[in-house]
Amino acid sequence: AEAVGLLRILEVRYSRNTINIGVSGRARVGKSTLLQSMSGLTDEQIPTGSGLPVTAVRSRIFHSPAHQRATLSLHTFDTFREEILRPYHVELGLQSVPTTIGEFRAFSYPKSEAELGEEYRDKHSSVSILRRLKEMQESLDTYIGDLVGGERTLPLTDLRQFVAYPTNEQIAAGNCTRRYLAVRDVRIECNFPYAQVDHIGIIDLPGLGELAANAEQYHLAGLQNEVDVVLLIKRPVEGLAYWGREDGATTNLLDKARGFIKHRRDFVFIVLNSSGLNTPLEVSLRDDICRQVNDGVDGKHFQVLEGSAADQKSVYQSILSPVLEHLAKRLPVMDDEVFEGTTATFAALKA
C-alpha cells in the first residue's frame, strides 16, 4: 500500500505541465500578500488580514494570458462528510458521523468540551475543533446549495466568498456565510504581471498552524502532490522574529513532503518578508535562522531569500528569479531522485 501511494505521487509529479511553487506560512507573515504580488490578484481573490487566518481553501494559481477566471471543485455531501466532517468527529472522539444532510442538521453535538470523552476534553485543541464543527452545522443553509459536486467556473470578482473565512465584522453583524465549506479547491487563471515562464503555477497552502481537524495531513497532501519547491515565509515582527518550536515542526513536515529528494535546500527556500531596512528584528530573525537552521553557515541546509512581499519588483528580483534559476538546474535531479526512490521501494517488495 505504501509503494502504491508513492507511485501515485510519482505519477502526479510527472504528469504536471507546469512548474509549481508552493507558498506556506503561518498567519500574519505575509503569505497572501506575496501571492498577490506574484499573481497580480487582489483581496477579492486572495484575501489578506492582520489577525486570524483568512484563506480557507487551497488555491492553485496559474499564469494564463488568455483567461481571467476561477474554477471551483465542489464537494458533494458524501465527500464533505468524509473529508471534512469525519476528521472533526475523529478529533473529538465522536463515534458516529451523519450519513445524510438531514442527520447532520439534527445531530446533537456536545454543548462544550466538558461533555467529550475523558481523553479528549483536556486536549487544548478540542474547544476550537468543537466550535468550528458547530459553526458548520449552524451555517449549513449558507452552503448546502453548493454541495453539488463537479466544477463551477466563475469570474474572479465573485471568488472571495468561496475561499475566505468570514470577517469579524460579518460575524458580528450576523451576515456569516460559509460557502467555502463546499469547495474542495480552486484553480485560478490570470495574467501574472512579471511572468518569466509560460507554464508556471503558484500553490497556496492554507492550514499551517491552524487548530483545525486534519490540518497537518491536508497541508502534507498538498505539498506531496502539487509542488516542485516550497517557499516557507517568515516575517520579522515582534513575537515572530526567531526560529521556534513550531518552525521546527514545520520543517519536519516539509521533510516528509520532500520524500526521496535528498537535499532540503533543493526543496525548501526560507523567505524572509522584510522591509530591506535592516531593522533590529530583521537582523535578529536572520541571525537566529542562520544559527538554528543552518548551523551558523549561510545556506548550509536551507537557502534563505529576502524581499518585501508587498513590492512586486522585490518579489520578482529577490525571490522568484532565484527560485526559477534553482529549478532550471535542480528540478531534473529531484525528478530522478524521486523516480529512483520509488522504484527502489518496489524492488525491495519484489525481493
Image (cartoon, helix red, strand yellow):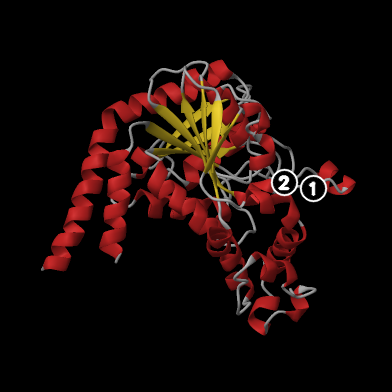
Kind of element beneath mark 2: loop
Residue 126: horizontal and vertical position, in percent? 69, 69
Picture quadrant of residue 70: top right
Provide the residue designation for mark 2.
Answer: 52
Q: Residue furthest left?
A: 351
Picture quadrant of residue 152: top right
Kind of element beneath mark 1: loop
Assign the N terminus to one quadrant of the image: bottom left
Query: Badge 1: few (under 14), some or many (20 or more) residues near its Cα, within 10 Å?
Result: some
Residue 111: horizontal and vertical position, in percent? 80, 74
Q: Which mark is residue 230?
A: none
Asked whether the residues under the numbered discs 1 and 2 touch, taking CB atoms below 8 Å apart as contact, a structural biologist would say: no
- Left or right? Give the position of 339 relative to 60: left
Provide the residue designation for mark 1.
Answer: 176
Which amino acid, by three-letter code, is at mark 1?
Cys
Residue 286: horizontal and vertical position, in percent? 54, 35
Taking the image as drawn, is residue 124 in sight? no
Q: In this rendered view, identify the residue nearer to me: 45 or 207.
A: 45
Q: Identify whether 26 is placed above or below 153.
A: below
Residue 248: horizontal and vertical position, in percent? 51, 53
Query: Badge 2: few (under 14), some or many (20 or more) residues near its Cα, within 10 Å?
Result: some
| Foreground: disc 1 or disc 2 | 1
Q: CA distance from mark 1 to mark 2?
A: 16 Å
Q: Residue at x 34, y 24 (%)?
A: 325
- Left or right? Give the position of 141 relative to 257: right
Of pointers 1 and 2, the one earlier in the residue sequence: 2
Q: In this rendered view, identify the residue nearer to me: 339 or 180.
A: 180
